[in-house]
């Protein structure tokens, strides 16, 4: 979500003639888009801003801060940056810039800025009035480095923002608010446009995509706020079909499985992936939809967070280990060879050795393809902040290492099953006769290509490869010529 927001900020500035400057020391303007899900991420923001201020050779340089930040974090950074703006108010950024820069950004092509993530924004057709941060740009684009643009095959489409779950360790509801869902018509339209412009992988984003709902109202033929020129410069709304001949009954509810189905039915050669899913909302309908739709990747990120019911209750996760294991059983029965990844927090306040052992046991039993492990860090405003953070840093590190070692073994076991199989790979990078890409199950693959074959494939192409070797964190293979 932060990556998507950064791209929106970039385009908004570039549309007003503000040029990219890859030299952070000389740039007139730096915008830092922060994430405060973990304390360590917020701490890095402090460090980056201090480093930028100390290393700048531009005395007029301005630093703007945005993203997910708690009030206490803003207070701590007060005086170190020139402005904080709420990411929800992105469309007000040009006006704010005019105030702090002393000139109008729309008339100042020499004004330049540096992006810490170096992401390149694709063109944004409009800013939705009620929730502008959810609107996605539609023009093709990728990473930018010293003025050179490299196309990317993936596009991120936010379908919702915020969260209603209030997990006891998480600040997202406090910094992004409760869930808001985009109209399905807009999402489907943007997916259709992205496919037409050559994107091969569509990521649907939400703090909890599973709870998505949109009510379709009015006629089946909707209007999208993409303006076209009319007489006397009037703005005319261009109508579009909800989905290539698709029909939606008036006032019908489109939930996440139905949204996936409608995007899957769009013409084109592309993949659909999504993050993140909440176990309590992983329905049978969703599992069946993934199983039946050929363009939805057989990769599911399903955060467990802990393998102990008492800790899950303290985390306010609202499911049990039994429920989670039953979900995994259903998924693997309905969708064979599905890759399942997860999130786990170690060292939650009060986590005993026995409770941690339950998490380790669960990891051995589930045999995850990937697990994103993190050490608990207290976050102000959350329920868990009132609990004693009584697990030492050293103990948290040791527990994380134990889980990582389990993951290495289970991931390797899963990856070895690919050896000898032919898989479809989306190429992300080609370097020194090695093509690196991802499978539909989100496995990284390194593919040897002959010099004669280098002109046959390009970055962002789909190719077929035979897997010849496997490691814990990826696969190796050889290209299969058509």
Image: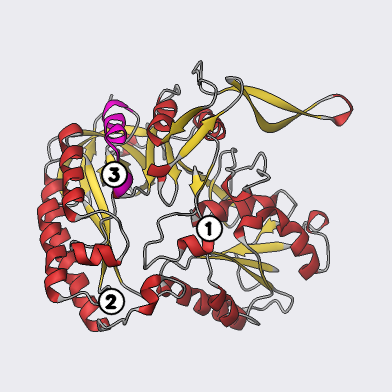
In whole angstroms, how far apart are the C-alphas of marks 1 and 2?
Answer: 25 Å
Residue 141: in magenta span: no
Q: Is residue 249 above or below residue 55?
A: above
Q: Which callout, 3 or 2, points to the residue nearer the camera?
A: 2
* Residue at the spot of label 1: 177
- Residue designated by label 2: 349
Q: Residue at x 46, y 61 (%)?
A: 172
Mark 1 and mark 3 in contact? Answer it, CB < 8 Å: no
The label on residue 255 is: none
Q: Secondary structure at mark 2?
A: loop
Which span of residues is magenta-colored?
A: 280-294
Q: Nearer the viewer, residue 324 or 412?
A: 324
Which of the 4 image quadrants contains residue 225? Answer: top right
Q: Position of residue 170 (x, y in %)?
A: 40, 65
| Disc nearer the start of the sequence (1/2) | 1
Question: Residue 424, located in which quarter of the rendered image?
Answer: top left
Closer to the camera in the image, 342 or 177: 177
Quadrant the C terminus occupies: top left
Magenta stretch: residue 282 in it? yes
Which residue is identified by label 3? 300
| Residue lying furthest right | 232
Majority secondary structure of magenta residues: helix
Position in image of residue 28 (x %, y %)? 70, 69
Whole-angstrom CA distance, mark 3 to mark 2, is: 28 Å
Mark toward the viewer: 1 or 3: 1
Using the image, determine if residue 441 lies above or below residue 374. above
Percent across and percent down for residue 151 are 50, 43
Q: Residues within 10 Å of mark 2 (few under 14, many from 20)?
A: many
Mark 3 crowd level (few <14, some 14–19, many ≥20, 10 Å Cα) = many
- Position of 247 relative to 7 (above/below): above
- Find residue 224 and report its horizontal and vertical position in percent: 64, 30
């Amino acid at each position: 979500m932060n990556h998507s927001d950064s791209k929106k900020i970039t385009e908004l500035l570039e549309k007003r003639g503000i040029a990219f400057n890859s030299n952070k020391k000389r740039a007139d303007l730096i915008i830092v888009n922060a994430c405060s899900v973990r304390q360590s991420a917020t701490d890095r923001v402090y460090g980056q801003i201090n480093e930028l201020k100390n290393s700048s050779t531009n005395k007029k340089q301005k630093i703007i801060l945005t993203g997910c930040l708690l009030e206490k974090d803003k207070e701590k950074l007060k005086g170190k940056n020139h402005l904080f703006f709420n990411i929800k108010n992105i469309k007000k950024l040009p006006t704010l810039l005019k105030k702090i820069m002393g000139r109008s950004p729309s008339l100042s092509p020499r004004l330049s800025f540096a992006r810490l993530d170096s992401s390149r924004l694709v063109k944004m057709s409009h800013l939705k009035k009620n929730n502008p941060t959810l609107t996605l740009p539609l023009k093709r684009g990728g990473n930018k480095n010293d003025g050179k643009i490299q196309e990317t095959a993936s596009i991120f489409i936010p379908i919702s923002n915020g969260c209603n779950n209030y997990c006891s360790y998480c600040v997202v509801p406090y910094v992004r608010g409760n869930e808001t869902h985009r109209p399905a018509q807009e999402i489907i339209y943007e997916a259709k446009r992205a496919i037409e412009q050559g994107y091969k992988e569509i990521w649907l984003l939400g703090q909890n995509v599973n709870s998505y709902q949109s009510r379709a109202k009015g006629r089946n033929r909707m209007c999208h706020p993409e303006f076209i020129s009319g007489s006397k410069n009037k703005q005319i709304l261009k109508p579009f079909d909800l989905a290539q001949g698709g029909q939606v009954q008036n006032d019908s509810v489109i939930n996440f499985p139905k949204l996936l189905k409608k995007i899957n039915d769009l013409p084109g050669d592309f993949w659909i992936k999504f993050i993140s899913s909440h176990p309590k909302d992983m329905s049978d309908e969703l599992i069946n939809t993934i199983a039946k739709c050929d363009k939805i990747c057989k990769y599911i990120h399903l955060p467990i967070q802990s393998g102990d019911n008492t800790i899950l209750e303290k985390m306010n996760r609202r499911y049990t280990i039994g429920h989670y294991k039953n979900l995994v059983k259903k998924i693997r029965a309905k969708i064979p060879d599905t890759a399942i990844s997860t999130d786990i927090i170690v060292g939650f306040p009060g986590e005993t050795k026995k409770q941690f052992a339950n998490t380790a046991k669960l990891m051995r039993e589930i045999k995850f393809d990937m697990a994103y492990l993190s050490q608990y860090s207290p976050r102000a405003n959350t329920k868990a902040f009132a609990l004693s953070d009584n697990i030492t840093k050293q103990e948290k590190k040791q527990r994380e290492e134990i889980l990582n070692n389990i993951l290495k073994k289970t991931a390797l076991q899963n990856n070895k099953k690919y050896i000898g199989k032919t898989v479809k790979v989306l190429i992300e990078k080609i370097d020194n006769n090695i093509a690196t890409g991802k499978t539909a199950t989100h496995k990284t693959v390194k593919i040897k290509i002959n010099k004669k074959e280098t002109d046959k494939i390009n970055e962002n192409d789909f190719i077929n490869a035979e897997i010849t070797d496997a490691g814990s964190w990826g696969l190796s293979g050889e290209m299969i010529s058509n």
